[in-house]
Amino acid sequence: MKSKTWFAGCIALLIGTLTFAQSYKPKAGYVPDSDTAVQIAEAVLAPVYGKNQIESERPFGAWLKEGVWTVSGTLHCAGAKGSPNAHCDGGVAVVEISKDDGRILSMMHGK
């Protein structure tokens, strides 16, 4: 009889724990800063566009607006020699990431 009571108690404890368990959510969200946003962006971009392509767009910048990180690569112009007014053809990867839960909201690459 004691073993049945003990077993029932364990089951009740397990069910109670599962019922009232709450997942941890950081106060600053799962993507608290720009460094984290860039790391996530590079991780999801590389399998889609290729590791070499994504590495060639470094450094990536990240900006937070209304709870969404926008992460964008850098377009490097051949022969521009650092000129801020240089025009070159091409595009960069852009990813939007939810600061709150880390979801990828959109991902694209310009041409």
Image: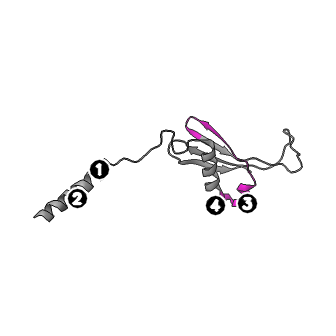
Query: In the rendered image of this protein, does residue 63 appear above or below residue 39?
Result: above
> Is 97 a magenta residue?
no
| Quadrant assignment, res 99 | top right
Tag 4 or tag 1, which sits nearer the N-term?
Answer: 1
Label 1 to label 4, Cα distance in Å?
A: 38 Å
Q: Nearer the viewer, residue 15 or 79?
A: 15
In the image: residue 7, left or right of residue 92: left
The extreme top residue here reads 66
Label 4 crowd bin: few (<14), some (14–19), many (20+), radius 10 Å? few
Q: Position of residue 20 (x, y in %)?
A: 30, 47
Tag 2 or tag 3, which sits nearer the N-term?
Answer: 2
Residue span colored magenta: 46-68
Residue linked to disc 2 = 11
Label 3 to label 2, Cα distance in Å?
A: 53 Å
Tag 4 or tag 2, which sits nearer the N-term?
Answer: 2
Q: Which mark is residue 19?
A: 1
Query: Which residue is found at the position 84% from the left and 48% from the top?
Result: 77
Tag 1 or tag 3, which sits nearer the N-term?
Answer: 1
Q: Which mark is residue 52?
A: 3
Q: Amino acid at mark 4?
A: Pro
Label 3 to label 1, Cα distance in Å?
A: 47 Å
Q: Amino acid at mark 2?
A: Ile
